[in-house]
Amino acid sequence: MDTFSAKKLYGGGDHMPPLVMAAPQRYIQGPGAISRIGRYIGIINVKRAAILASRRAIVAEGARVTESLHSNHIESVDCIFDGECSLPEIEKHVAALKDENIDCLIAVGGGKPVDAGKSIAWRLDIPVVIVPTLASNDAPCSALSVLYTPEGASDVVEFYPTSPTLVVIDTDIVADANERYLVAGMGDAMATWYEARICLNNLDARTPLGARPTIAACAMAEICAHTLFEHGEAAAKSVVANQNGTALEKVVEANTLLSGIGFESGGLALAHPMALAYTQIDELHTNYLHGEMVAMGTMVQLAMEQSEDAKKVAQFFARVGLPIHLGQFSMSPQDTNKLDIIIESAMANANSHQMPMVVTEDLLLRAIMDAHELGLRIAEEIGDEAYQRLRA
């Protein structure tokens, strides 16, 4: 199937690209929302849906989706997601579903089944409905998927001509999940504003859509950061207590909706290229969540900018339990071979060069070390109790 290129659609030539904002057709969030999904997808006239979920989720959240569909006279077929958002996994499901006469695909789970679901639905030319069971990343609302190799290293990014038709997130399910996932989502979401503001102020910068950032998306990105600073710690405590509440609702919206629109239509800078570069190291992609890697990338970006916000962000990360120095990231400054691999990968990513300075290997290494030193100071100041608790 021919790939879709948003950059060719909106960019190219010698003209300034347009402002473009992408968003899901509907975003629905609240307690018990998953039990009403059959009613919600009635707006797209679905008669038969495929449900993509892990082996665990297919008999848990997936069963609740099935029950709601059947009570609304919608047939369903189950698909087991086997753990990696890779091209072989995607093509396996496309082959299995192409003759099933389905009207839409419902992707249930975390970031990888969500991204796989978008890719499968696009290949089948059907709408995709996203049902996140975690607020661990900002994948649900975007019209793109990050694909990995079967071994788990980042591979390519696929772009789609349309955003998800529906995103339905049940905050009671998020409240029952492991705290670490919500906190990782905060790490992913916090980067959104700091990357978007780089793109907004750099006339040569482009969003993942190949367009210029909209004020609306950047405003969402900024509100996202403010929401995390104000409510992040309280939301984490809610998840520890398995209780929903105002703080958790606000942070789920920040992690999922505000960050999702903010990064796609606001733009990326250095934080996300660093996160993808970290996946080239086996110990990192095996032991750390995407949002934890983005948090470390945000520290590096702010260090390179010499931003006044670097300390504030590091303090927040320390309080909620995100890694803030190499020692908390299975590395040390002496790991020169690993650092060389990370730097080479980040330098090859075009988004790294949206920064307002010329990014070189030496400058990037210096920023990594400056971020590490800041993290050590903040860890000594605040302690690492939250970080250790999430890994107990």
Image (spheres, grey):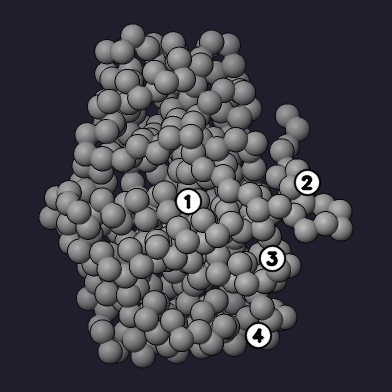
- Sequence-earlier tag: 4 or 3: 3
Q: Residues within 10 Å of mark 3 (few under 14, many from 20)?
A: many
Residue at numbered disc 2:
8
Residue 42 relative to residue 208: left or right = left
Establish if 127 lies above or below 98. below
- Sequence-earlier tag: 4 or 1: 1
x, y (%) of residue 144? 58, 44
- Sequence-earlier tag: 1 or 3: 3
Q: Are marks 4 and 1 in contact (CB under 8 Å)?
A: no
The N terminus sits in image quarter: top right
Q: Quadrant of residue 255?
A: bottom left
Element type at marker 2? helix
Establish if 377 lies above or below 268. below
Residue at numbered disc 3:
205
Residue at numbered disc 1:
260
Q: Is residue 146 visible?
A: yes
Residue at numbered disc 4:
363
Q: Which residue type does callout 1 highlight?
A: Gly
Whole-Å distance between the Cαs marked 1 and 3? 18 Å
